[in-house]
Amino acid sequence: MTAVGIDAVEIRTGKLELDLAETFAPAKGESPEKYTKGLGLHASSFPDTYEDIVTMGANAAHRLMERKGLEPDDIGRIDVATESAFDNSKPVSTYIAGCLEQVYDGDFHHANKGERKFACVAGTQSIDDAYNWIRAGRHRGRKAIVVATDTALYARGDPGEATQGAGAVALLISEDPDLVELSPEQGFGSADETDFLKPNQQFPSVDGKRSVQVYLARMREAVEDFESVWGEIEPGDFTLVPFHTPFPGMVRKAALLGFRHMTRNTHIEEELAEEIGRQPRHEAFDDEEAFRDAISEYTDKLKETDTYAAWYDDVIEPTLTISRQVGNWYTGSVHVARISGLKQALEAGEDLTGERLLVGSYGSGAQAEIHAETVQPGWEEEIAELNVDEQLDSRYSISFEEYEHIHDVHNHDTDTQADAEEFTTPDEEFVFDGWGRMGERKYRYVG
Ligand code: CAA
């Protein structure tokens, strides 16, 4: 069977940076450690006045096409995953295609375009759609572009304000991919949940504490479902485990439960038994609460072991490096985690060709998805081409007052975006250019 997977990726961060420990925490009267240690976040990315989900997505897709030498005719599908859309009818993919057509001779008139919605898991679902389109043989040799783009803004004063972010990831899905092959095996954990939603409103209604519990519950279901088709998984099976990362502290919780699950009935559990005992088994308890207490005590001890710490440092920590600097990108977040892990491996001089990743995506509302990926021989070249560090380093650092201003500028109720003064100067990129006669957003390329 021909391999199908991710051929290349690009990221595009919002061009403003809010330092959470130095700027945001003091203004909120909070301890900087809540951010750096508790949530695991140092900074958030924000869009400048001329940026939005379309410009970030189009700029990422443009760099992807240029780097891979692609013309519009090579693309048979453009799907956008977002939870920040501003139009209930016309998909963001049409706006992005319109942008790209400004800089290419050809057009995307024969590409199937759409928009996927299921909170943050929609990016992975769009990759799925592209995978299935290729596997079904309907692609006529063409490739698919998936863009996951979001401005993850919360209402001011909401606890979620601590985890904001803005950016886009563009992914090229094709046969014989250069980066990773996707496994046909998948696991799902899906239930009707009311943890985070936006009922026709820009800023989310969130039950933050509950959302953390729902993430863990759905992820556990997805792992079990994945194992039913893949077979049981053990920690040593995967070199990196990129998770959806609303904030790195969330992944810290998920990784610990994942490690406990993967080590049950393995030699690792036996080796740890002398130090912390064996994992409590549900069937050994008559009382649910007593079991919960016992498993929670075991988990606390497991977290402190060198075995767990070493696994976490190798397999999870590298996936969090970019997220710590940019915050939550919703649909793009798990794809940022994959890039981060591969980038760290490249910088450490590791050879990952043929190694496996286990990818855990999640969307509120709620659904988790687990699949495996196999790293392809072209991965080093693909990752080496990224300009992530340059983008992060060149962000303009905003004060708390500037943060409040930019938050207002991007508030859809204020209509101030077109006139707001920018903090950075656009250069060879798509920018927001005001509204058209039917209320549509307009864009132009600044050369
Ligand atoms: N030093 C060290 N750690 C500190 C600290 C200090 N001085 N002060 C606080 N902390 C720790 C806390 O103990 C806590 O860690 P634990 O959970 O491990 O105990 C962490 O910092 C955060 O502190 P709080 O829980 O007090 O923070 P909060 O109540 O203000 O809000 C939140 C946290 C609920 C996650 C909130 O940011 C939120 O609502 N975020 C949006 C929702 C979200 O991201 N949910 C994640 C799952 S849903 C999802 O994944 C989808 C999505 O993308 C939105």
Image (tube, helix red, strand yellow):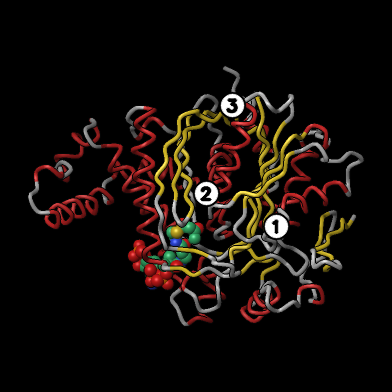
Residue of label 1: 89
In the image: residue 197, left or right of residue 169: left
The answer to whether 407 is drawn above or below residue 181 in the figure is below
Residue 148: x %, y % from top left: 63, 50
**Distance (Cα) linking label 1 and label 3:** 38 Å
Q: Is residue 419 left or right of residue 92?
A: right
Residue 104 is situated, as x and y percent measured from the top left of the image, at 88, 42
Badge 1 density bin: few <14, some 14–19, many ≥20, Cα 10 Å? few
Q: How many marks?
A: 3
Mark 3 neighbour density, 10 Å: few (under 14) some (14–19) many (20 or more): many
- Looking at the rendered structure, the kind of residue marked 1 is Ser
Residue drawn at 65 percent across, 25 percent down: 175
Q: Are marks 1 and 3 in contact (CB under 8 Å)?
A: no
Q: Looking at numbered disc 3 in the image, what kind of residue is underneath it?
A: Gln
| Residue on which the image places disc 3 | 376
* Mark 1 beta carbon near ligand 1 (under 8 Å): no
Mark 1 vs mark 2: give the one in front: 1
Which element carries disc 2, helix, strand or loop? loop
Gap between marks 1 and 2, in whole Å?
21 Å
**Disc 1 element:** loop
Q: Residue at x 40, y 64 (%)?
A: 38
Q: Percent x, y for residue 79?
A: 67, 44
Above-or-below relation of 150 to 402:
above
| Rendered-image quarter of ligand 1 | bottom left
Callouts 2 and 3 close, C-beta under 8 Å: no
In the rendered image, the vertical position of residue 38 relative to residue 104, given as above or below: below
Q: CA distance from mark 2 to mark 3?
A: 24 Å
Residue sitting at x 53%, y 64%: 42
Whether residue 35 appears in this view of the structure is: no
Dividing the picture into quadrants, the one containing residue 290 is bottom left
The residue beneath circle 2 is: 121
